[in-house]
Image (cartoon, coloured by chain):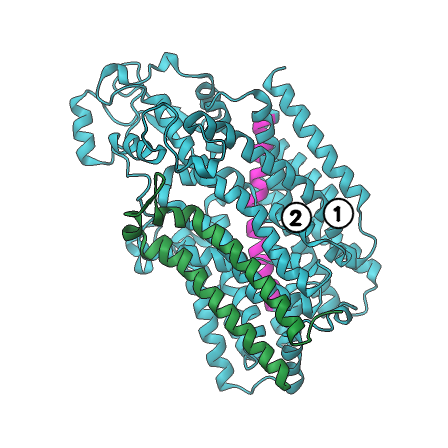
Chain colours: A cyan, B green
Amino acid sequence: MDLQTLTYIVVGFTFALYIGIAFWARAGTTGEFYAAGRGVHPIANGMATAADWMSAASFISMAGLIAFNGYGASVFLMGWTGGYVLLALLLAPYLRKFGKFTVPEFIGDRYYSRTARIVAVICLILASVTYVIGQMKGIGVAFSRFLQIDYDTGLFIGMGIVFIYAVMGGMKGITYTQIAQYCVLIFAYTVPAIFISMNLTGNPVPQLGLGSTMADGSGTFMMDRLDQVVTDLGFKEYSTQVMGSKLNMFVYTLSLMIGTAGLPHVIIRFFTVPKVKDARSSAGWALVFIAILYTTAPAVGSMARLNLMNTIQVGDVGTVEGNLAYADRPQWFKNWEQTGLLKYEDKNGDGRIQYYNEKNAEFAAKAEAWGWKGNEMTKVDRDIMVLANPEIANLPNWVIALVVAGGLAAALSTAAGLLLAISSSISHDLLKGVFMPDISEKNELMAGRIAMAGAIGVAGYFGLHPPDFAAGTVAIAFGLAASSIFPVLMMGIFNKKVNRAGAIWGMSSGIGVTMLYVFQHKGIMFIPGTSFLGDMGANWFMGISPNAFGAVGALVNFAVAITVSKMTAPPPDHIQHLVEDIRVPKGAGAATDH
Amino acid sequence: MNKTAEQYWKANIRLVSILLVIWFICSFLFGIILVEPLNTIKIGGLGLGFWFAQNGSIYTFLVLIYVYAKRMNALDVEFDVHED
């Protein structure tokens, strides 16, 4: 059976499964719509959280980032997992004890202020919408590439499928669908990794293969071989190359960690478990399921890089036969050339491929002596690494089809979770909480679904006309969540003295500083040409890249909130009692009544 | 806050502080700040600093959450603030 038919079958089957589950578990009450009726087991909840969390960025992009940034990409590995420690220790159990449905609801009650609640809703919507646009775009690209239709049609199909199961099912439907999606995506990620690790090192466990010797009998470690191969061609040594500077890596990691613990679609998960006890273990289970992918990723990235280099540099560097003849290039090379994500240009006209780091002056001089006229792989898009990996390693077609289904599962599950967070903040926090307190449960549910459909429309619109969003999207979403939501939640629990004014000023200044920094370097709303300081390292504050600035915004948030609180009246007694109450698990059952 | 609730909270803060110090050490300290000296120690083909940055820190995070959940559940019972 050819690859195309097989892809149709595998993707079609998984989608039928998701939609079937969404129908079976559709929501009847607002409780089920927002929080799955609190009837979800911690292991199931952890698996769903993992699917929710691991987006197209984790599944498709991250291994590519690792492949080309080596050690420097550790910021993503530590940042996107370490946040769960903060979540489990500092937020999850207390928010579950508090026992409401949404993050702004907690902020509104704790800071006894509708203004604080509205500010929180705005921060939440800004962070979630930016994130969901990136997902929609990923869905569009994935559908168009593998169903071989144009991008717009691919996006519309994706919007339709997200609409069906997110809008019909609500949280309950999403939770069960995401469990299925987790199984699909983790299977799709680990199977090729096991095959490749086996081929290269003879060790079937990718995490161990990373530190093993090559299977070719040379006794050389895989990592040493990789360092050798890349430095031979003038690239930076894989295992030591840093991203920016040490300070940048530090702040970047911190920013992603805090952002993880501040993203509403993740936090909302911990409202869906039966007990405070379960909220603690749920975060642990989520991290177990996430760690399976995240500890596999370094092996996938490094081995993909090694395979790629070995495919092109077939012999000794500097000899004519050392470079692959273009006419002999493998099938996967041709496939990806068609997408435009892999490009070759025969600069010296010898019909062979020279792939090296032309920016390394010392090496470029040597290359010139060999008659090389510049790097001929003019484009190697790092996002293709995970998708191309099984093809590069000559794995069977069903594995490739599975990877496609896995990528789609990752993108769809995250989009659905984010949409739920957006819809609940509009229908529950804005309508019921602020503007129409008397709204009936049925109408609130309806408003939630309309808000979700609206959000899909908005995200789809930006997906159709992307204002150069792709690169900045994920970064700003994390920065915004880190600088606004996390600090006020944490202070709300751990510092009884932080008051209404402190929270409002803290959130506004934190998110304000972050947005200003990102926009001044990346363009206002990412529109190129409007960035008044330019996207260049020289203008970065202490060498911190805009992607990493959320941590600084969070610090500003903490500092402003505490200072303002000291200068204004402390919170009233009943609020201080509320804080004392959420600190102990006892009595959580009663608080769930809505 | 009555006496036991206060003690419960203090015990909680102590536990969380210890765990967060380890959280910092295994990621920021071993994975970023001290990565070069640690890389001179090899486990298999990998430098120890590199291993912490790409694998070890994640395993440590898992243990931290596990210990936290277990210890807190025990504290809940000890101070009689557990759910029924």
- Compared with A276, B81 (above or below) is below
Residue A571, given in percent of the width and then of the height, sits at 60, 84
Residue A371, given in percent of the width and then of the height, sits at 19, 20
- Residue A47 appears in view: yes
- Residue at horizontal 71%, vertical 58%? A272
Q: Is the magenta stretch mostly helix, strand or loop?
A: helix
In the image as oriented, which residue stretches furthest toward the top?
A327
- Residue at horizontal 79%, vertical 46%? A25
* Mark toward the start of the polypeptide (1 vs 2): 2
Relative placement, left or right, of A293 versus A586 is: left
Q: Residue A173 carries which label?
A: 1
Q: How dense is the environment of label 2, judged by Cα within 10 Å: few (below 14), some, or many (20 and up)?
A: many
Would you name the residue on which mark 2 appears?
A48
Depth check, front residue: A176 or A499: A176
Q: Please state which of the two labelled residues, at mark 1 or mark 2, is closer to the viewer.
A: 2
Relative placement, left or right, of A210 versus A187 is: left
Depth check, front residue: A544 or A471: A544
Depth check, front residue: A329 or A124: A329
Q: How dense is the environment of label 1, judged by Cα within 10 Å: few (below 14), some, or many (20 and up)?
A: many
- Residue A531 appears in view: no
Which region of the structure is painted magenta?
A: A119-146
* Distance between mark 1 and mark 2 Cα atoms: 11 Å
- Compared with B79, A455 (above or below) is above
- Residue at horizontal 36%, vertical 31%? A213
Residue A188, quarter of the rendered image: top right
Residue A424, given in percent of the width and then of the height, sits at 70, 58
Circle 2: residue type: Ala
Tell which subunit mark 1 falls on.
A
